[in-house]
Image (cartoon, rainbow, N blue to C red):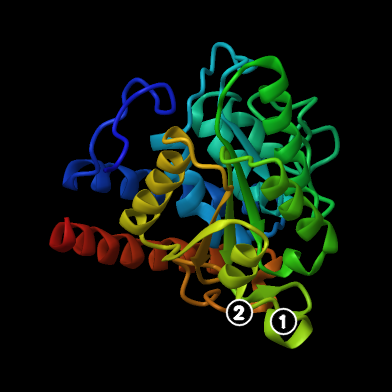
Amino acid sequence: MLFRSGKFMPANYKPFDKEEWLRLEKKADELRRLTVQTTVWGGSGHIGGAMSAMDAMTILYHRFMKLDVNNPDLPDRDRFVLSKGHAAVGYGPVICDYGFMDVEGLHNFNLTGSKFGMHLDCNKIKGIDCSSGSLGHGLSLACGFALAGRVNGIDYMNYVLTGDGELNEGSNWEAAMTAAQFKLSNVVVLVDNNKCMIDGRVDDEMKVEPIDEKFEAFGFITERVDGQNLKELNNAIENAINNHKNGGDKPYCIVMDTFKGAGIDFMEDDYHWHYGALDAAKEKQCYDSLDKYYAARVARAEKEA
């Protein structure tokens, strides 16, 4: 039975019906557009991986996570770690849109003197639980958060968004062993499996598949979903929360099959857009492509809800 209410869900949580699906589709579209704009303001950015991860960040922040913009250090808030920290050009818009920081701050993204750097600093940006950017360390930090909560008698969920290319760092697997050893069922790893990294295709640089089977071998419960489908993401995250709520003793891994640059046709599945800049013509192409992408996703939600 899916968990619909209680201390692991925000007070305004509701069933995932058509209205909720369409609300989240609209928000994901708004955040993708703000990510494009932030890339333009900053002169460049890691836009490809931000786009592939945007659905996961959207549904976590706007459906599942317990947060309070008026009290960002709330002891029992849910924690989020952007282990693939270079996707900050998308994470900054999520944080600002949610209300932790002013959107105007993004106008100076990654420029001298800005609070918003290429990798977000938790000492400068409200609502961020830890700085990240050095790849491979996010799961370790989440394990630390979970263990600290256990020591302090506070229970909350700990979500880690990692990239598939990042999984060639051995520190991930040390942390995976730790999560299983200490039965951290409130740790949820979401792998943005977009199959691209800065140097090329992940399979060409360092094979990491089968990711789900590897995490299972390390003691995780695993699921594999379409990471660009909000309904599948919703069901998987609910299952992960239920695992913890119902007394499970294993951490959870959701492998999200995604596309680099999701929503922007000339970027999709192209590792060259790991990082890039947008001139006026390309910016317009982005918005035109996002118009079509959003329409197709709304049509899918209308049909499948």
Instruction: Provide residue 284's location: percent of width, then percent of height.
Output: 48, 64
Q: Residue at x 44, y 27 (%)?
A: 8
Q: Residues within 10 Å of mark 2 (few under 14, many from 20)?
A: some
Residue type of the residue flagged with mark 1 = Lys
Picture coordinates of residue 277 (x, y %)?
A: 68, 64
The residue shown at (50%, 68%) is 258
Image spot of residue 180 (x, y percent): 67, 49
Is 5 on the left or on the right of 109, as rendered? Answer: left
Q: Residue at x 46, y 46 (%)?
A: 240
Q: Amino acid at mark 2?
A: Asp
- The local secondary structure at tag 1 comes to loop
Disc 1 to disc 2, C-alpha distance: 17 Å
Say which residue label 2 marks.
Answer: 270
Vertical relation: 292 (above or below) 237? below
| Residue 32 in sight in this render | no
Q: Which mark is residue 207?
A: 1
Q: Tell me the quadrant of the picture where the N terminus can be found.
A: top left
